[in-house]
Each structure stands twice: as structure tokens, then as C-alpha cells.
Amino acid sequence: MARSLGRIFRGFQSLGSLAFMKSELSNPPASVSLKSMVQTLPSVFSSNPRDFSLPNPSWGTEMRQLYEHYNSQCEAVTDGGEEQSGLWKRLPSYNRSLKYAAGGVYLSKIIQAKARLFTRNIRDPGAAFEYVIFANKKEQRCVCIFQAGHLLEGPPGNVHGGAIATMIDTVTGTHACVHSGPVMTANLNINYRSPIPLGSTVLIESSLDKKEGRKTFISCKVTSADGARLHTEATALFVSISVGQLMKG
Ligand SMILES: CCCCC/C=C\C/C=C\C/C=C\C/C=C\CCCC(=O)SCCNC(=O)CCNC(=O)[C@H](O)C(C)(C)COP(=O)(O)OP(=O)(O)OC[C@H]1O[C@@H](n2cnc3c(N)ncnc32)[C@H](O)[C@@H]1OP(=O)(O)O
């Protein structure tokens, strides 16, 4: 199992692309373990997982406008199959970490069936974490558009500091995975500069500072949607891990 997952996790750097999974399935390596896992367990295979990064009716005007702004600058494949280049890439988002690793394939029943990604475990759209992350590989930065729902209250009318930390960890962690493959957060430093009103949409921007061996250093800032107000600043350190390490816990 660990070896099969090893192959899956090597797809991290093609995070956001179902193409990785498709090619794994159509050109399997000699031992074919992932393909046979899927074939022998048809009831746990879903080729159409929900992508939480796509717009839903709970998104407000600001969230939609920002989404359109970045989405219109994304690489895309036209109906005619032509690849269009773009500065940005929208990263799909699923409700299990393993779905990211497998390009969306549902392996949930194989490992901890009831586990769900913290930020994607509330069914009511708009109630908690609504977000979409775009990556710009050339400039080595990511941007997340985050709409904070009413279940994230901390101080009256404002977002809980732990919820803000969760989103910073999510954006910088995703950025680190895109850049370096599987990682764990080793250190997260946060300065809260001004409260984030509940229900508002903010921008979370992360940039790669440096990579030293297994260590990936990322900086992050959270601002109002127009960029005028600084809410939070953070730095984070991620350490690359092997799959064996991940499975040991
Ligand atoms: C979770 C990722 C994998 C699964 C995700 C799957 C797909 C992801 C795809 C998309 C993203 C989806 C969601 C992402 C959302 C959020 C991401 C959340 C990530 C987390 O929420 S994750 C949970 C919290 N996280 C932990 O639960 C970590 C507990 N911890 C450990 O598991 C170990 O501690 C570990 C592995 C960190 C290191 O252990 P280790 O034995 O492998 O390595 P070692 O200790 O030798 O350190 C090597 C070098 O890092 C330096 N170093 C280490 N720690 C440091 C520190 N704190 N400050 C300064 N430097 C530090 C050393 O000084 C040395 O540096 P040098 O090489 O220069 O000497």
C-alpha cells in the first residue's frame, strides 16, 4: 500500500491536473497497483468528484468578480483541443487530501473512510470556508480568494484567528506542495494586523521565499479584496516528507 501511495504522491507537483491521474491509469508502471486497486474496488471509485473551487450560489459579487479576474488569465484547453497559455492555473479542490494526491480519484474507503479535509467538511455552501486558489508557477506565487462564512466567527462580527490561520496554512501548504511535492507544516508565524469582517471576501497571497534542501519557506499576506487594507501577515516553513513518513503519522 505504501508503495502504491508513493506513486500517487509523486503526482503532487502536477497538482490540479486530472491529466496526471489519467496518464497513471492509461500508462501504468509495471506493478499497476493503483489501476488494479481502482479496478478491484469499483464501489469506491468516483471519476467525478466534486470540485469545491468552482463557483456556487453562495459566492458574493466580490468573490465572483475576483474569480473571473484570475480565471480569465488561466491556461485552458479550447473546445477544439487547442491549449491556450495563461499566467495562472486554477487548482481544483476536493474534500479529502488523498483526492488531491490521486488527481481526484476517490480512495477514501481505503484509508480512514470518514476523514474529510478540515476546510471542506461543511456541506452548507457559504457557511464556512469558501475559497479558490490560483497558482502562478512562473512568478512562484499563489493567490487565494476567500469568503469567510458565518460559522467562522471569533470576536463578534469578525473571523476567528484560528480560521484565518487555517486558511494561511492551506494556501501556503498548497503552494509548498505545488513547488516541492508532499510536505508538512513545520513552522507558522502569524501577525494579525486588522480584523476580517465575517462574510467579507479577502485575498490571501503567498510567495516563495527560498528552498533549502527539504525546507520550503513561504510568505503570505491577507488583504481586503481591493488590496487597500492589510489584515494578516505570515511566514511558514514546510519540510518535504516521504510517503512512508506520512503513513506512519
Ligand atoms: C499534509 C501534506 C500531505 C497530504 C496532503 C495531500 C495533498 C496536498 C495537496 C493539496 C493541499 C491540500 C490541502 C493542503 C492544506 C493544508 C496543508 C496543511 C499541512 C498541515 O497542516 S501539516 C500538519 C501540521 N504539521 C505537523 O503535524 C508536522 C509535525 N512535525 C513533523 O512531522 C516533523 O517535525 C517534520 C516532518 C516537520 C520534520 O521532521 P523530520 O524528522 O522529517 O525532519 P527534521 O526534524 O530532521 O527537520 C528537517 C529540517 O527542517 C528543520 N526544521 C524542522 N522543524 C522545524 C521548525 N519547527 N522550525 C525550524 N526548522 C525546522 C530542521 O532543523 C532540519 O533542518 P536542517 O536540515 O537544516 O538541519
Image (cartoon, rainbow, N blue to C red):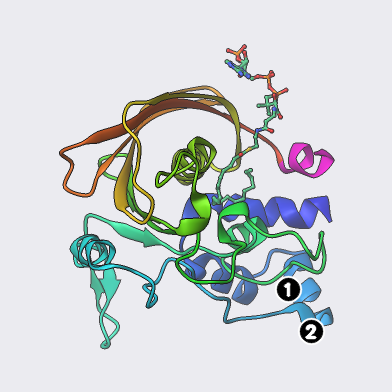
Q: Quadrant of the C terminus?
A: top right
**Crowd class of label 2 (few under 14; some 14 to 19; many from 20; radius 10 Å):** few
**Crowd class of label 1 (few under 14; some 14 to 19; many from 20; radius 10 Å):** some
Callout 1 secondary element: helix
Going by the image, does 110 lie left or right of 95?
right
Q: Amino acid at mark 1?
A: Lys
Q: Is residue 53 magenta?
A: no
Give the residue drawn at x 20%, y 36%. 229
Q: Amino acid at mark 2?
A: Ser
Give the residue drawn at x 50%, y 45%. 170
Q: Is residue 88 visible?
A: yes
Going by the image, does 29 lie left or right of 186?
right
In front here: 74 or 154? 154
Closer to the chain start, of discs 2 and 1, is 1
Q: Quarter-wise, where is residue 243 in the image?
A: top right
Q: Is residue 246 magenta?
A: yes
- Over which residues does the magenta segment extend? 243-249
In front here: 151 or 93? 151
The residue labelled by disc 2 is: 43
Callout 2 secondary element: helix
